[in-house]
Amino acid sequence: MKLIEVKNLEKVYQSGESKTVALDGVSFLVDKGEFIAIMGPSGSGKSTLLQLLGFLDRQTGGSYKFDGKSIEEYSEPELARIRNEKIGFVFQAFNLLARSSVYENVRLPLFYSNVPETAWDSKIKSAIDAVGISHRIVHEPGELSGGEKQRVAIARSFVLDPEMILADEPTGNLDSKNGEMIIKLLDELNRKTGRTIILITHEESLAKYARRLIRMKDGKVESDIRI
Amino acid sequence: MTTRHLIKTALTALKAHKSRSFLTILGIVIGITAIILVMSIGQGAQDLILSQIQGLGSRTIVVIPGREPSGPSDVAQIFSDSLKEKDLALISRKENVPNAEKIMPIVFGGESSAYGNETYRATVLGASADVFDVFDIYPAGGVPFSESDVRGRQAYAVIGSKVKDELFGGSEAIGERIKIKEKNFRVVGVLPKKGQVSFFNFDEIVLVPYTAAQDSLFGIKYFHRFIISADAEKNIARVVEDLQATLRNSHGITDPKKDDFFVQTQEDLAARIGIITNILTLLLVSVAAISLIVGGIGIMNIMLVAVTERTREIGLRKALGAANRDILRQFLLEAVILTGIGGILGILTGALLAFGVSLILSQALGLSWTFSFPISGALIGFLVSGIIGLAFGIYPARKASQKNPIDALRYE
């Protein structure tokens, strides 16, 4: 069963007269449980691709099927539900809520879920435990190091057991040691629970952890190899 | 997202920006404060005036010379001389007004009174001997003047406590002669401290037989008022009709529109004053309401800034599964909670200020002012502030909800 089927995906940004083609006919398939790294120079369309895959935006051409169903068939609230239940996001800039504790940050997706509140606490704590920051549970982002912040963001991304985690340069703001630790966490999530992981990175050394490497250039797939 | 979590989320966001939240609601606080203050003082003024009217007793009917004023420009008409001795004699006859219990003519005016070197400008009230019963006030020292004193046109005076203090200080007043408008009056009684009753402050009054007042003080042969009490509450309307018929007959008037007098019951007066104070209150409340609208615009303004500032948060929430309606509700709720808190603060400050004003009026100025908390005003104020939150919060909230999660996340 294919988790993702992308065919001739196009995304054109139009502002006034100027047109920017971010994706120019991208096609690939993703199985459940894959760990894919996407690489490419900036402006190659990799972030745009990730956003489309994560239902944060809609394509201007081509088709995108997730779990066998085309994105056009979903309404706005349904897309929000899929983002909540099936997809976890990890961002380069962490995007944690300031003035909220680690616990509260990891709890955030639960607010928008159907999970009964009685089950929240154990889910939150086991996610925080899994990324190894239980000792920081009451701290606010301002008191955490970059590596710790990204670990909180990862805990938040899988607290609802999503099918797929999308990570957009999660190590971009980290030193190499912390960066490697974050990738190892993602690798572990992939190996232990079979979650599909799609990772954007600039660093070849980190891309090696993936089992498949897609290189992009000028909005097109340049190469797609298994490693 | 459940309502409880929605409220929690909104409260967390507001707590994160305490000082801005406070500044945001300041306009609402001030608006509601003004409304509560105005309503409370309006109610207090109405209560005060009504209690003074009721000091005369609910069975009291007043006949006033001149045409009934239909507007502010008619006030001058009151100073007419249509109530004469002949009218008093006619209405005093049992067969004309059978249900009248007491009939008291009065004349009054401000006159300077003097004793030795001391002078004091008092209200001189010329009345029949019934005045003591009608106003339920009797001399604490000395005696009241009698009906025969009135008939004998005796220059006797019963003086109020403040008049006594001003003219005599600590020394004895009874038996002394005071000069009112250069005429000698003998003090026969001193009233106890009583304050305002109906339209007279009895502490600052000099009571004299109306005959003496007419002759030697005012030089008039008419009366300023007839004060009549009906024998029973249910007969008030009859007494009014009888008075009107008798006086019209006496004045040769056939068309009631041409009356040169008018009859006022306490109920009329209360209703009339109620209308005036209500209109005044309404006027002031509507001025205060404008500040609420200004406050609402302030909220909208600051919410719009907040929406821009929190673009990244909105994007994040959407990425984590918030639907547009969740964001809309969150921001709307923040606005409503803000204005609701503003409303409560306004109600509290308004009530506190009104209480302060009532203390000043009752303690410092000696008015029998009672503080009243306008419950209906508080409810309306609370509701209105909530509605303002909704009305002025919807636009920023819509803007927030319609942000594209991608643009929102990219926003630096």
Image: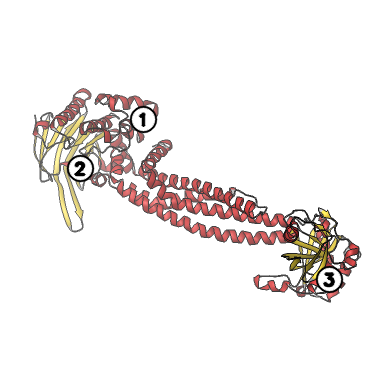
Reading the image, the residue beneath label 1 is A115
The residues bearing labels 2 and 3 have C-alpha atoms spaced at a distance of 100 Å
Q: Earlier in the sequence, mark 2 or mark 1?
A: 2
Vertical position of residue B166 compared to residue A112: above or below = below
Q: Is residue B40 visible?
A: yes
Label 2 lies in what chain? A
Q: Is residue B40 left or right of residue B155?
A: left
For marks 2 and 3, give the one nearer the viewer: 3
Q: Is residue B7 left or right of residue B79?
A: left
On whether disc 2 and disc 3 are found on a single subunit, the reply is no
Q: Indicate the secondary structure of the residue bearing disc 2.
A: strand
Q: Indicate the secondary structure of the residue bearing disc 1.
A: loop
User: Which residue corresponds to the image point at 43% horizontal and 46% vertical from the top-left?
Assistant: B338
Task: State the quadrant of the N terminus of chain B.
Answer: top left
Vertical position of residue B380 compared to residue B222: above or below = above
Within 10 Å of the Cα at label 2, are there few (<14), some (14-19), or many (20+) other Cα atoms?
A: some
Reading the image, the residue beneath label 2 is A63
For marks 3 and 1, give the one nearer the viewer: 3
For marks 2 and 1, give the one nearer the viewer: 1
The residues bearing labels 2 and 1 have C-alpha atoms spaced at a distance of 31 Å
Outermost residue toward the bottom in this view: B252
User: Which residue corresponds to the image point at 38% horizontal and 39% vertical from the top-left?
Assistant: B12
User: Which residue corresponds to the image point at 54% horizontal and 57% vertical from the top-left?
Assistant: B285
Report which quarter residue B69 is drawn in. Answer: bottom right
Query: Circles 2 and 1: CB distance less than 8 Å?
Result: no
Amino acid on which disc 2 is placed? Ser
Reading the image, the residue beneath label 3 is B247
Q: Is residue B240 visible?
A: no
* Rendered location of residue B123, percent (x, y): 74, 65
